[in-house]
Image (cartoon, helix red, strand yellow):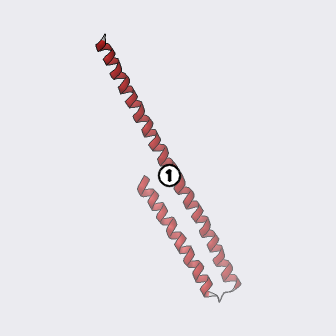
């Protein structure tokens, strides 16, 4: 009788371990999906900011074509944000690829 209880307890422990492993794997996948979504949202936000800066460049160019300093600083801002998008995309690829 005692041997039977021991075997039953071992089976229950094995089942509990397998269930826990599956839950942990599921949680890891959910976490990875959440990180990917956050990265995608970040890239989208940065792209919108870049579009705004490009519009600003066009506006500066139209309002005062000779104002090279203002235009140049806006172009530098666009380049910085574009670099951020590129790095974020690469980071997403490397960490979740």
Residue visible at 31% across and 13% down? 4
Quarter holding the N terminus is top left
Residue visible at 42% across and 55% down? 95
The answer to which quarter of the image holds residue 91 is: bottom left
Image: 85 above or below 1:
below
The answer to which quarter of the image holds residue 77 is: bottom right
Residue furthest toward the bottom?
66
Residue visible at 42% across and 39% down? 25
Residue furthest toward the front?
2
The answer to which quarter of the image holds residue 68 is: bottom right
Q: Is residue 10 left or right of residue 56?
A: left
Q: Position of residue 29 (x, y in %)?
A: 46, 43
Q: Secondary structure at mark 1?
A: helix
Q: Is residue 1 left or right of residue 34?
A: left
Residue visible at 55% across and 61% down? 43
Residue furthest toward the top?
1
Labels in figure, total: 1
Q: Position of residue 79 (x, y in %)?
A: 53, 74
For label 1, count other residues whose C-alpha is less than 10 Å away and answer few (under 14), some (14-19) or many (20+). Answer: some
Q: Position of residue 87 (x, y in %)?
A: 47, 65
Q: Which residue is mark 1?
A: 35
Residue furthest toward the left?
3
Q: Position of residue 8 (x, y in %)?
A: 35, 18
């Amino acid at each position: 009788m005692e041997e039977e209880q021991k075997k039953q307890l071992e089976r229950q422990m094995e089942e509990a371990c397998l269930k826990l492993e599956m839950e942990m794997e599921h949680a890891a996948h959910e976490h990875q999906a959440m990180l990917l979504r956050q990265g995608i949202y970040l890239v989208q936000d940065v792209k919108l900011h870049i579009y705004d800066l490009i519009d600003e460049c066009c506006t500066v160019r139209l309002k005062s074509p000779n104002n090279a300093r203002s235009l140049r600083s806006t172009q530098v801002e666009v380049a910085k944000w574009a670099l951020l998008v590129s790095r974020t995309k690469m980071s997403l690829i490397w960490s979740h690829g």
